Amino acid sequence: MRAAVIREHGGVDVLRVEEVPEPKPAADEVLVKVLCAGLNHLDIWVRKGRPGAKFQMPHVMGSDAVGVVEAVGAEVTHVKAGDEVVIYPGLSCGHCGACARGERSLCASFGIVGFQRPGTFAEKVAVPAYCVYPRPVHLSPEEAGGFVLAYLTAWRMLMTRAEVRPGDCVLIHGIGGGVAICALQLAKQAGAEVIVTSSSDEKLSRARELGADHTINYRKEDVAGHAREITGSSGVDVVIDAVGAATWPIDLSVVHKGGKVVLCGITTGAIAETNLQAVYWNQLTLMGSTLGSMDDLRRMVKAVEVGNLRPVVDEVFPLKKVQEATQKMEDARQLGKIVLKVSD
């Protein structure tokens, strides 16, 4: 079968489409024929290599996908061949206390499809049976292919961790990214007032079309100062941050007393200074967030279906153009999800 693989870590040029053996599902796994697969920033870190992470080469990339179940293992009973599914990419032990509560992303052995095991940028992928979930019927294959990871991450940040309520003011950094766009859609559905940032006026204009109440070009304006003007000097209730080191000082200065900062990514770096006085004096709550629980997934999918929300797809590339697709994401030229069309 065809798959986008790496045989070594490095730049975009190490990512190639090759013929690799078709996976065989274990007793507790399912084999899925992949229709479309979404790109995520995780793919960049996997390709470049992370300290301490080991990969069996060649390694198949990708964490998001939509497809059709082609075969199931002997122990699998809740899905069958022919079912249309999306991939929940979280991997866990299945028997610890966190897993028993459905909190798979809190498992000590938590991993992600496409990182700890072969991924979804392939004509077929084998995953544990708990990793498949019925495809929302109103989504096209292209929309569903880049659906789960970004929406679920945004849902957990907003609803589970920050507990956003109607009337809250939410600041979202870097509105071009997939998680940021999903957070905008979900926050508006929840009744929040939303401020978004970007260095691109074009992206900010598109964000307003998607419902953003206020936009800030961080190349031209002071984000914290402008946000405080918007809120009548009080500051925002919640900050959603997938950027990391570059925005961390802004986060601490833009939330009001008792506010919340939720972090899910470090695209600008993992090390940042923290004003501890601001944290304790303003009684801030700083939270990390990764993917989501099975209950988060169920609630998120229901909210998307009820609200008829659709992922914003920036561009669809054929699998053979995976290098071009990845370069566009790495250059931050997209607004929304970049998707690979793998099979018909």
Image: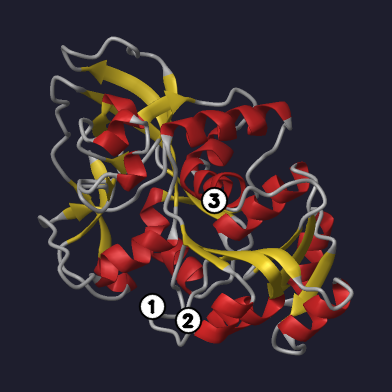
Residue ID at (20%, 71%): 9
Residue ID at (40%, 41%): 342
Q: Farthest residue in the left direction? A: 56
| Residue ID for mark 2 | 245
Residue 161: image tag: 3
Q: In this view, does 161 lie above or below 128?
A: below
Q: Position of residue 27 (x, y in %)?
A: 14, 19
Crowdedness of circle 3 by 10 Å Cα count: few (<14), some, many (20+)?
A: some
Q: Do the residues labelled 2 and 3 touch (CB within 8 Å)?
A: no
Residue ID at (29%, 34%): 99
Q: In which quarter of the image is the C terminus?
A: top left
Residue 270: image tag: 1
Q: Do the residues labelled 1 and 2 touch (CB within 8 Å)?
A: yes
Q: Farthest residue in the front direction? A: 281
Q: Is residue 162 above or below residue 133?
A: below
Which of the marked residues, 1 or 2, is nearer the chain's N terminus? 2
Residues 316 and 48: in front is: 48
Tell how many labels. 3
Instruction: State whether residue 96 appears in this view.
Output: yes
Instruction: State whether residue 201 appears in this view.
Output: no
Which of the marked residues, 2 or 3, is nearer the chain's N terminus? 3
Look at the numbered disc 1 and give the secondary structure of its residue.
loop
In-image side of 210 versus 270 (left or right): right
In-image side of 218 versus 105 (left or right): right
